[in-house]
Image (spheres, coloured by chain):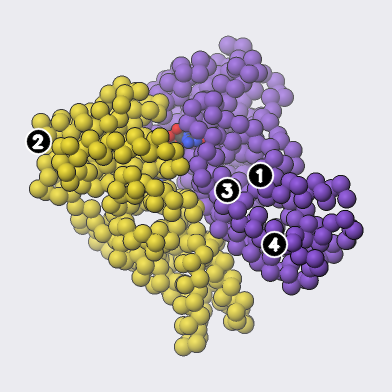
Chain colours: A yellow, B purple
């Protein structure tokens, strides 16, 4: 069921019609907008299909292939794995994003991924605000066999980050992953708190955090652009993770984000289980967006 | 929320009101711009299409009144259609059923169900003086039940004691039983987040609904949602028969398209909006006020109304 039914059906219906004219292209553009690509990307891709139509006869299948190709072209340069630097002990990953995007869950999955790769991991419960956020991450630390550090709810998040770094260093851990409370990017006070966490980490290691991951929910619309902008400013976002791609949303906004910010996309979340994290693959993503089957590949990383 | 839309629509319609006569081409051009503005604000394509069609249809045959310009008439039409799309009257949560009144909260993962459950419970207990019980049917997310229990302590609302190992259905039955025995007025049932493609979980929530016969089934949805809003709203409505929508994160600078879309495709009212993380950050949704805010042209609208 992992297909974008609307887009698939839409394109097929569109290109089985007799006439292929400007109106057909307008409708294709609409279908792309309907996948959250945004106007600019939708226009560009539609233009590409328009050009191809002069060269050859197009049916629904081949239009989808062209769209997928165009999307993959945008995304391929940003499909970059996340390899925490081995020289830093600990390497620090800070995880940020708006409320409910999937930060804490992604941290659990990341811990599992890197533990499987042989790393010693500390998880820090930097969400000292939300009810039971600490308990939630504690469960994930347990699942992923990671060391866990927390303070009481209401404690200063930067102070927790400070202690967590000290602990990770004392434990000679390879990787410290810090959870943060969800926050909307238009809240200056909360964004400043994030800045403070970064400042504290830099006291230990000027390079820290070595990665600052923004977690984006696949259902998000144009607001994601503002998220990338604002979190980029205060938390120096170095890469993205897109979650909830197992639902009906195809995450088309990622295309607009990639065009505008060219930030690496490291992983996608495809479920709530500890193993439901996959490396980001531009082709798979693009094909899923237009409802083409995925080309089977071997994932070893 | 709605700021982008307000800016864009305001500009487009403002230009229109300044002109004397309006040709059909003028209206078409303005509607093309309105269409774009709505799409850029995340309003679902199908909703945009029907909205623009309706406005065009009415604008073409518009009767001219002496004291107002055709442009002002068009603004009024856009306003009216916006109100129609949002629903004319504010519709609060209904408790008009035999106590304990069950209210079922459903939605995608992370949309804000648990937080909204606590907000509603708090409101019903402090403002409306109802005796409220909250129960978490979320057997999946780590610490979901602790989250609701903590919120219960913060809001001073009773929560159903946690019994590990029970299914969502068992918890739902236990909650209703506790509601009856404890003399509660309302039982709020918080559920686990689920994608609508997850057949097992969708079946689970249908079972819960059958067993508890909720008076309200509230779809909790994120105001930052893009075009997926219609797919999700429709799927939940078809599966469990939604009675209203709770829109969360309205305190963000989301463009608000999800609000317009979900209301339009399900016909179900937005009953409440979440405007923050704390349990008092909740407001009623007043469609007329929102429509005015989006258009920011209340003067023109009342001018036309008086004419
Ligand atoms: N289906 C699906 N659900 C996910 C995915 N990632 C996270 N979730 C769910 O989304 C919900 C929110 O996830 P969290 O990890 O708590 O999100 P968060 O960003 O930490 O939330 P806050 O800390 O409250 O801001 C939970 O129910 C998760 O199980 C995913 O890839 N797919
Ligand atoms: N800014 C803001 N945050 C909100 C609002 N409503 C909920 N949240 C936050 O959104 C995040 C997710 O809220 P939850 O109530 O846990 O969401 P949920 O739907 O129960 O999540 P799952 O049970 O995992 O599916 C938390 O960080 C909440 O504090 C709101 O109206 N505004
Ligand atoms: Mg979290
Ligand atoms: Mg919940």
Residue that lies at the very extreme toward the top in this rendered image? B182
CB of mark 1 near ligand 2 (< 8 Å): no
CB of mark 2 near ligand 3 (< 8 Å): no
Q: Residues within 10 Å of mark 1 (few under 14, many from 20)?
A: some
| Disc 3 to disc 4: CB gap under 8 Å | no
Quick one: label 4 or label 1, which is nearer the N terminus? 4
For the C terminus of chain A, which image quadrant?
Answer: bottom left
- Residue linked to disc 4: B15
Q: Which mark is residue A172?
A: 2
Q: CA distance from mark 4 to mark 1?
A: 18 Å
Q: Secondary structure at mark 3?
A: helix
In the image, residue A198 above or below residue B283: below
Mark 4 against mark 1, which lies toward the viewer?
4
Choose top left, top right, bottom left or bottom right for residue A155: top left
Q: Secondary structure at mark 2?
A: loop
| Disc 2 to disc 4: CB gap under 8 Å | no
Query: Quadrant holding ligand 1?
Result: top left
Mark 3 against mark 4, which lies toward the viewer?
4
- Residue linked to disc 3: B3
Residue that lies at the very extreme toward the right in this rendered image? B66
Q: CA distance from mark 2 to mark 3?
A: 49 Å
Q: CA distance from mark 3 to mark 4?
A: 19 Å
Pointers 4 and 1 within a single chain: yes
- Residue linked to disc 1: B293
Q: Residue at x 39, y 51 (%)?
A: A229
Mark 1 against mark 2, which lies toward the viewer?
1
| Disc 1 to disc 3: CB gap under 8 Å | no
Q: CA distance from mark 1 to mark 2?
A: 56 Å
Mark 2 against mark 4, which lies toward the viewer?
4
Q: CA distance from mark 1 to mark 3?
A: 9 Å
> Where residue A40 sits: x, y (%)?
48, 66
Q: Left or right: where does residue A192 sit relative to residue B178? A: left
């Amino acid at each position: 069921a992992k297909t974008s039914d609307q887009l698939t059906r839409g394109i097929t219906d569109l290109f089985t019609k007799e006439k292929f004219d400007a109106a057909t292209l307008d409708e294709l553009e609409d279908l792309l907008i309907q996948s959250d690509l945004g106007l600019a990307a939708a226009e560009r891709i539609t233009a590409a299909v328009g050009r191809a139509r002069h060269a050859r006869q197009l049916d629904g299948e081949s239009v989808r292939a062209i769209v997928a190709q165009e999307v993959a072209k945008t995304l391929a340069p940003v499909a970059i794995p996340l390899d925490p630097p081995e020289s830093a002990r600990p390497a620090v990953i800070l995880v940020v994003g708006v409320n409910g995007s999937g930060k804490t869950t992604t941290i659990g999955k990341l811990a599992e991924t890197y533990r499987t790769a042989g790393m010693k991991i500390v998880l820090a419960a930097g969400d000292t605000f939300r009810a039971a956020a600490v308990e939630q991450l504690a469960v994930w630390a347990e699942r992923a066999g990671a060391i866990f550090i927390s303070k009481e709810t209401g404690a200063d998040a930067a102070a927790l980050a400070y202690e967590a770094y000290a602990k990770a260093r004392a434990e000679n851990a390879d990787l410290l992953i810090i959870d943060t409370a969800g926050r909307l990017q238009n809240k200056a006070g909360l964004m400043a708190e994030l800045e403070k966490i970064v400042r504290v980490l830099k006291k230990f290691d000027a390079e820290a955090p070595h990665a600052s991951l923004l977690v984006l929910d696949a259902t998000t619309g144009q607001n994601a652009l503002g998220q990338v902008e604002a979190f980029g400013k205060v938390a120096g976002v170095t890469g993205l993770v897109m979650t909830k791609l197992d639902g009906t949303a195809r995450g088309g906004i990622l295309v607009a984000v990639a065009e505008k910010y060219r930030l690496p996309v490291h992983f996608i979340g495809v479920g709530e289980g500890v193993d439901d994290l996959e490396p980001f693959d531009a082709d798979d993503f693009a094909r899923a967006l237009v409802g083409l089957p995925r080309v089977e590949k071997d994932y070893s990383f | 929320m709605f700021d982008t839309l307000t800016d864009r629509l305001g500009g487009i319609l403002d230009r229109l009101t300044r002109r004397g006569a309006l040709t059909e081409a003028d209206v078409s051009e303005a509607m093309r711009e309105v269409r774009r503005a709505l799409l850029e604000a995340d309003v679902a394509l199908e909703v945009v299409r029907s909205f623009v069609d309706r406005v065009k249809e009415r604008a073409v045959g518009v009767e001219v009144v002496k004291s107002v310009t055709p442009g002002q008439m068009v603004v009024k039409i856009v306003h009216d259609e916006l109100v129609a799309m949002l629903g004319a009257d504010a519709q609060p949560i209904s408790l008009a059923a035999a106590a304990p009144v069950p209210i079922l909260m459903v939605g995608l993962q992370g949309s804000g169900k648990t937080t909204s459950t606590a907000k509603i419970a708090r409101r019903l207990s402090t403002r409306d003086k109802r005796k409220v019980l909250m129960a978490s049917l979320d057997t999946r997310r780590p610490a979901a039940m602790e989250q609701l229990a903590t919120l219960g302590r913060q809001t001073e609302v009773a929560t159903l004691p946690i019994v590990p190992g029970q299914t969502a259905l068992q918890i739902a039955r236990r909650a209703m039983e506790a509601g009856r025995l404890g003399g509660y007025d309302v039982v709020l049932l918080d559920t686990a987040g689920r994608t609508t493609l997850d057949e097992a979980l969708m079946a689970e929530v249908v079972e819960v609904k059958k067993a508890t016969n909720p008076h309200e089934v509230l779809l909790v949805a994120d105001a930052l949602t893009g075009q997926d809003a219609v797919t999700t709203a429709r799927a939940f409505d078809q599966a469990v028969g939604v009675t209203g929508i709770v829109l969360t994160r309205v305190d963000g600078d989301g463009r608000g398209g999800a609000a317009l879309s979900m209301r339009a495709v399900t016909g179900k009212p937005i009953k409440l909006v979440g405007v923050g993380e704390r349990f008092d950050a909740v407001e009623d949704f007043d469609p007329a006020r929102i429509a005015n805010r989006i258009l920011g042209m209340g003067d023109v609208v009342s001018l036309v109304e008086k004419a």
